């Protein structure tokens, strides 16, 4: 997983409430288990017409938002089913930060497991950032270590994040990566357990 410390990038305004995971990745694309290539179908039914052509009015089909790294959205982002394809598609498109008043719990946790930082802020702060994203200079800077978002006018907005999840993002560790940090201890435990209870293992006792 790619490490996250600071990010400066284009913020796309998506002032829609209850953006669910089917809007992010329609169900017909759930057959793949690959994490790459999904960026092209992110918000597919909102970005493309039935014949596959871009819908010009959708924000991610317009400049400069085609290169957005940040989404500023409405409440309850990521609701619906728990499909992990949703954060995969966001990440493959290039989105590393999502700012909204609230998130669905499963989606929120899936973001951290895939290197995306979801930031929950009061509606008033989201409104300010939504305005920034709609301005002529829609660039925000997110500092995870300092837990601040710098606006185009130089002002900053503070945010909170769980210390453990923050550490995982900064180090670029998903749950498997976290476990592998303790590989030597795991091996020692397995060896001791094997000697004490060899019948739990398929190999022959030595």
Image (tube, helix red, strand yellow):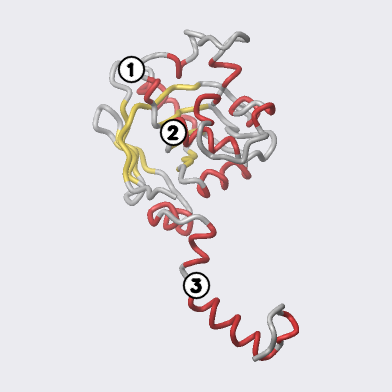
Horizontal and vertical percent position of residue 22 = 65, 28
Q: Residue at x 75, y 84 (%)?
A: 199
Horizontal and vertical percent position of residue 115 = 46, 46
Q: Residue at x 65, y 90 (%)?
A: 195
**Residue 206: which numbered mark, if any?**
none
Alpha-carbon distance for marks 2 and 3?
32 Å
Tell me whether the residue at label 3 lies in contact with that at label 1, contact meaning CB atoms closer than 8 angstroms.
no
Q: Nearer the viewer, residue 145 or 116?
A: 116
What kind of element bears circle 3? Answer: helix
Q: Tell me the mark number nearer the camera, choosing from 2 and 3.
A: 3
Count of residue discs: 3
Q: Is residue 128 something one can see in this rendering?
A: no
Comes first in the chain, label 1 or label 2? 2
Alpha-carbon distance for marks 3 and 1?
49 Å
The residue beneath circle 2 is 95
**Residue 183: which numbered mark, if any?**
3
Horizontal and vertical percent position of residue 53 = 53, 9
Q: Is the residue marked by circle 1 packed among few (<14), some (14-19), or many (20+) residues within 10 Å?
A: few
Q: Residue at x 69, y 28 (%)?
A: 27
The residue beneath circle 1 is 135
Q: Nearer the viewer, residue 126 or 114?
A: 114
What kind of element bears circle 1? Answer: loop
Tell me whether the residue at label 1 lies in contact with that at label 2, contact meaning CB atoms closer than 8 angstroms.
no
Q: Is residue 138 something one can see in this rendering?
A: yes
> In which quadrant of the rendered view does residue 11 lie?
top left
Left or right: where does residue 95 sit relative to residue 102?
left
Quarter placement of the C terminus = bottom right
> Please, which residue is most extreme toward the right here?
199
Comes first in the chain, label 2 or label 3? 2
In this picture, is 181 found above or below 158? below
Tell me whether the residue at label 2 lies in contact with that at label 3, contact meaning CB atoms closer than 8 angstroms.
no
Q: Residue at x 47, y 59 (%)?
A: 164
């Amino acid at each position: 997983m790619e490490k996250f410390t600071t990010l400066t990038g284009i913020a796309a305004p998506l002032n829609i409430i209850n953006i669910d995971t089917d809007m992010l990745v329609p169900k017909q694309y759930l057959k793949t288990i690959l994490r790459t290539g999904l960026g092209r179908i992110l918000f597919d039914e909102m970005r493309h017409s039935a014949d596959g052509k871009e819908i010009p009015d959708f924000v991610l089909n317009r400049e400069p938002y085609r290169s957005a790294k940040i989404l500023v959205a409405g409440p309850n982002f990521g609701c619906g089913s728990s499909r992990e394809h949703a954060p995969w598609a966001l990440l493959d498109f290039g989105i590393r930060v999502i700012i909204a008043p609230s998130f669905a719990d499963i989606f929120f946790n899936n973001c951290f497991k895939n290197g995306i930082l979801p930031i929950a802020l009061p509606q008033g702060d989201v409104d300010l950032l939504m305005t920034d994203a709609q301005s002529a200079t829609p660039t925000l800077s997110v500092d995870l270590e300092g837990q601040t978002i710098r606006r185009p006018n130089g002002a900053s907005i503070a945010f909170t994040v769980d210390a453990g999840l923050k550490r995982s993002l900064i180090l670029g560790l998903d749950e498997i990566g976290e476990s592998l940090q303790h590989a030597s201890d795991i091996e020692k435990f397995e060896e001791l357990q094997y000697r004490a209870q060899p019948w739990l293992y398929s190999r022959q006792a030595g």
